[in-house]
Amino acid sequence: MNFMESAIDIAKTVQGEIAVGAVVVKNGEIIASSANKKEQDKDVTSHAEILALRMAAKKLDSWRLDDCDLYVTLEPCPMCAWAIINSRIKNVYFGSFDTNYGALGSKIDLRQIANSKLKVYGGIMEKECDKILEECFKELR
Amino acid sequence: MNFMESAIDIAKTVQGEIAVGAVVVKNGEIIASSANKKEQDKDVTSHAEILALRMAAKKLDSWRLDDCDLYVTLEPCPMCAWAIINSRIKNVYFGSFDTNYGALGSKIDLRQIANSKLKVYGGIMEKECDKILEECFKELR
């Protein structure tokens, strides 16, 4: 199964805010997923990654998301990157690069501060992810 | 009223995890507050600042915490600093400096990436805040 496609499908459902989708995978199965819901929830912390991490932690009854991977359509911001690092996620796969605020390599790399072993793979299905954001920004304008 | 004292009182209630307290103030009144509850909630995002921001947003029915200040006993980590910056908090007052992970000046300053006008005042009641952390770390060992 292509987990980035699942994240993309979630991103495509977003209305009225920045279209991002994220899924958490363990042992080849999606155990949690979310869209960005900042506007819907009226909560700055309701980014797709944060909501997916929280859902995964609930499912595993632990904040330690050992042996879990995260797939997200946009490079995580510093808030999400730090949460991901601290949750012990093993691998992050993201779609679009965020040269303004991307905190897993593009603008800064918070792994350096955390001395983290998190592995990061950027640009997965990049064109599809970029297209979702472009269409979203058109609508938001 | 001394709002840092309120944050300290909250930090002192913490058991079994890093003792941090935070309050959000608007128009001279505390509108939200929280302790760090990462272990209690089994949620990496349950830092005192994040929980206080979310509570304030609920109270104001908006993620935009205009004209609000945040008082917290320890310098915010990158996750919390980014959430604070994005929530439009006006002033942050923190107690202890965090030279390992502090993201409002000590280790990094995320305001530079966000091009943020957030004002930050560190070292408020620093000795009291340092003492709480020292005692907490003794207990956690």
Image (tube, coloured by chain):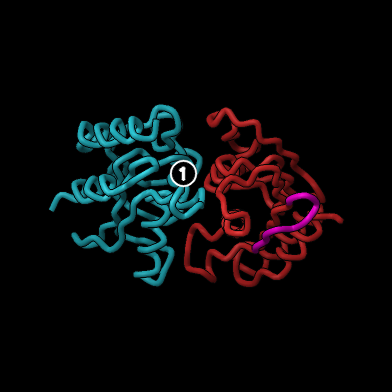
Chain colours: A cyan, B red
Write the start and end of the magenta stretch as one range: B26-34
Q: How many marks?
A: 1
**Residue tagged by mark 1?**
A115
**On the rendered image, what quadrant is the C terminus of chain B found in?**
bottom right
> Who's the residue at 39% across and 69% down the image?
A58
Secondary structure at badge 1 equals loop
**Near-viewer residue (B51 or A61):** B51
Secondary structure mostly seen in the magenta stretch = strand
Q: Picture coordinates of residue A44 (x, y %)?
A: 51, 48
Residue B22: percent from left, percent from top: 68, 57
Reply yes or no: does residue A136 show up in magenta: no
Image quarter in which the N terminus of chain B is found? bottom right
Quarter of the rendering containing residue A99:
top left
Residue pictured at 36% horizontal, 57% vertical: A52
Chain letter, disc 1 residue: A
Q: Is residue A91 visible?
A: no
Q: Residues within 10 Å of mark 1 (few under 14, many from 20)?
A: few
State the residue in front, B15 or B5.
B5
